[in-house]
Image (cartoon, grey):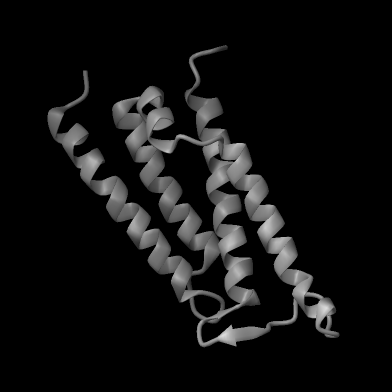
Amino acid sequence: MTSILLRVASGALLPLFLVLSVWFLERGHDEPGGGFTGGLVAVAGLIYFALVRGPGALEARLRTASESVAALGIVLAVASGFVGPVMGKPFLTAIWWAPGFGTPTLFEAGVYLLVIGGAGTALRALLSEET
């Protein structure tokens, strides 16, 4: 049986972990943080939630296949690289459309989704009750 304190904390801490992960993502391409770090923080919150409440509660909270999230991340990261060649520049050239938003932002968002989707897939496999 899980402690009531852990159950309450898991419900309150998961949104905080996700907000913190988006903050790391927003720090972005030129500062410590970015998609990988933000994704790991989000996954840490998901792991805590799943360990306290169980894999069924995690499945109900996520509502989407983690493989799809990982695939979307790969597509977004790779697509951000092709903006440069379309504009006559090398692959993965940083192109900024507005302050703080450009191809590096799209690339970091793709990495963020890939980390969350990949770790979510691994977490579901580890916590599955099938052997």
**x then y, percent, for residue 28:** 51, 74
Tell me: residue 125, above or below residue 91.
Answer: above
Q: Quick one: which residue is furthest to the left in this view? A: 5
**Front position in the image: 93 or 36:** 93
Residue depicted at x 84% and y 81%: 90
Residue depicted at x 61% and y 60%: 110
Residue depicted at x 35% and y 61%: 20
- Which quarter shows the N terminus? top left
**From the viewer's perspective, is 62 left or right of 81?**
left
**From the viewer's perspective, is 13 left or right of 109?**
left
**x then y, percent, for residue 61:** 38, 35
Residue depicted at x 57% and y 44%: 117
**From the viewer's perspective, is 71 left or right of 16?**
right
**x then y, percent, for residue 72:** 64, 50
**Front position in the image: 124 or 90:** 90
**x then y, percent, for residue 56:** 39, 23
- Which quarter shows the C terminus? top right
Q: Quick one: which residue is furthest to the top in this view? A: 131
| Figure disc tally | 0
Q: Residue 83 appears in which quarter of the rendering?
A: bottom right
Q: Residue 104 appears in which quarter of the rendering?
A: bottom right
